[in-house]
Image (cartoon, helix red, strand yellow):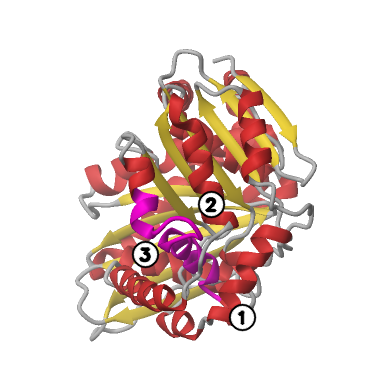
Amino acid sequence: MKQIVKKTVLDNGITILTDYMPHAYSVAVGVWVPRGSRHEAKDEFGLSHFYEHLVFKGTEKRSALEIAHAIEDKGGNLEAYTTRQETGFYAQIERSHLPLAIDVIADMLMHPRMDKGEMEKERRVIIEEIHSYDDIPEEIVGDVFNAIHFKGSGIAHSITGTVKQVKALTHRQMLKYREQVISEIPLLICASGKVDHEELVQLCAEKFAQKKCSDVLPADTYRAHNSVKVVQKQDIAQSNLFWGLSFDRNLMDERGRCALSLFNVAMGAGMASRLFQKIREDKGLAYSVYSTADIYCDCTDWGVSLATEPHQLKTALELSLNETHGFLKRGFNKGEFERTKTNILGGMYLGADSPEKRVVRMAEQTLHLGEFHTMEHSEKIIKSMTEEEVVGTVNRLFGAAKFSAAVIEPAGRKKTELPLDFFEH
C-alpha cells in the first residue's frame, strides 16, 4: 500500500500532487477548484454547477466537439462534477497522452469562451437536469434535510439551484466567475498513475502561466439546527425519509474520521449492514436503505436514507433509531468489528488499482481535510483501532451533534408528524 507521493507549489500558487503507480498504463489527472455551491451568494445559487457545464462548451481554440474528440479519440474520458465544497475536472488517459490532457483541461479553465448563445442553450439543459432530480424523491428529501438542518449556511442550498435561480443567473456573473478562477481562487492539480512528477510540474507551469497568484479561499460558515420537516408531493407512492446529524469538524481528528467510517459501514454501507438486514431483510419494509457520511472543511454529517410505504414510515424510522441507539449503548456485535475493518481495507485495496479513484481521493482529502493521508497511513490507523475507541468516539460525536429529519410523502393523506426530539430515547 506504499504510495510515492510528491508535492510542488508553483510561483502562482498552484499546488501539484502526484501519486506514482509504476505498473499502471494510464494516468488520471485533474484540476480542482476549491469553490462549490456552499460559497455562492444568494443571487448566485447554481453558479458553480453552471460554470462546470459551460467550460465544456468551447474555448478560444476548441469547440465543444473538439474538446470531446481530443480526449475520447485517444480512448480516454473527461469528467467533471460540482459538490458543495469544490468543482473538479479530470481526465483518465493513456500515459503518453498526459500533455494533451493537461492542455485540454487548462484550456477549458484558463480560456473558456463563455459564449452567450451557448450559455442559453446550456441553461435549458441544466433546467432539464433539475427537473430530472425533481422526479426522484430520494434526491428531494436530501435537499430538504440540508435546507432545514444547515439553514443559515451555504450547505443549505442545492448544488444545481432551483429552476428560478438558474433562470436568473447572468452572463456577467459567469464572466466574473471565470475571472475568479483565473485570478483569485488557488487551484489544486492532482495526478495518479504512470506520471512523472517533474514532467507534470513543467507542463502545468506552461499551460497555467496565465493563472495569477492567490491563496484566498472562499469562506466556509457552519451552522446547524435541530429541525423536522414533512413535505407532501403529488405522483409518488412511497414515503422517503432522511434523518441525520452534524457536528463541528474540530471535534474529529484523523482517528475520529476512521472511527466514524467504521461505524458508518457497520450501520448502513452494504447488504450486510445492520440497517439493511433489519429493515429490508428481516422486516421487508424498504427496497433502498443505507447510511452515508460527508466530510466538509468545517463540519461532518451522517445520516440514514430509506423509502417505504407511507403507513410503515414511523416503524422504519423507529427501527433505524433503535439500531443506532443499540450501537451507541452496546457497540459492535460479535465478529462485526473485524468484518467491518476487513470491509474498509478491502475496499481501499480494490481502489488502489484505479488511478481515477486514487486521484479523486487525493484531491478531496487535500481539500476537505487540509492534508493528504496515504493509504498506508490510513491502513495503519484502521488496523490499530479498537472497539472501545470507535464506540467512545461515536458517542462523543453524537453527544455534540444537532439532529434533523426530512420526509417526502404522497399528497392526499394526513400529514405525518414527527417530534423535534425524535432521536432522544
Q: Residue 97: x percent and y percent?
A: 44, 31
Q: Is residue 2 visible?
A: yes
Q: CA distance from mark 3 to mark 2?
A: 33 Å
Give the alpha-carbon distance from disc 1 to disc 2, as whole Å.
29 Å
The residue wearing badge 2 is: 107
Q: Are marks 3 and 1 in contact (CB under 8 Å)?
A: no
Image x and y of residue 285, in percent? 23, 55
Mark 1 sits on what residue? 42
Name the foreground residue: 313 vs 219: 219
Query: Which residue is found at the position 47% from the left and 73% from the top?
Result: 115
312 versus 269 height, above or below: below
Residue, disc 3:
139
Residue 396 drawn at (x, y percent): 68, 45
For the point 43% across and 41% down, the residue is: 267
Marks 3 and 2, the one that precedes in the sequence: 2
Establish if 327 lies above or below 230: above
Q: Secondary structure at mark 3?
A: helix
Residue span colored magenta: 45-68
- Circle 3 crowding by C-alpha within 10 Å: few under 14, some 14–19, many from 20: some
In depth, the one of 374 and 95 nearer the eye is: 95
